[in-house]
Image (tube, grey):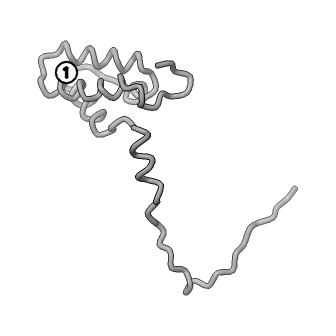
Amino acid sequence: MNNAVAHVNVPWSEITLTSIDASDEYDALTGSMRYCPTSLLSAFALLMAGHGRCINTSMMLGDREYAMWQLARAHTLQDRELRGIAAKLFAYFDDERAPVPAGLHA
């Protein structure tokens, strides 16, 4: 068994980097990848709960059919705010550029 441990002798007084440095690659990723807006998803879940409809946000992210079904259910309710949020989320789930979890087919 190899129990080797990497060790670097750097004097603490010479460390100039902070624990959180900006990434130059962040801007490149934001244009090519889109993630589900979790604040909208949370608002959607709370508004649906207010109508007695419990949804699973993890399933919303992992099962497109489940997500589309819940968004369709939201449109049947007479709540303008909920319908607006559902429409915004629908635009995400219906977007071909949005990442599809492994094993799912768009």
- Disc 1 residue type (three-letter): His
Residue hosting label 1: 51
Name the residue furthest bottom.
13
The residue under the point 41% across, 16% down is: 65
Question: Quadrant of the rendered structure where residue 42 is?
Answer: top left
The residue under the point 70% across, 75% down is: 8
- Residue 54 rendering spot, x and y as whole percentages: 30, 22
**65 with respect to 37 (left or right):** right
Q: Is residue 79 above or below residue 12?
A: above
Q: Quadrant of the N terminus?
A: bottom right
For this rendering, which residue is in front, 85 or 3? 85
The residue under the point 41% across, 52% down is: 27
Question: Quadrant of the rendered structure where residue 84 is?
Answer: top left
**1 with respect to 5 (left or right):** right
Q: Residues within 10 Å of mark 1 (few under 14, many from 20)?
A: few
Quick one: SS at disc 1? loop
- Residue 79 rendering spot, x and y as whole percentages: 13, 22
- Residue 21 rendering spot, x and y as whole percentages: 46, 66
- Residue 38 rendering spot, x and y as whole percentages: 33, 38
The residue under the point 44% across, 53% down is: 26
Q: How many marks?
A: 1
Q: Is residue 82 above or below residue 38?
A: above
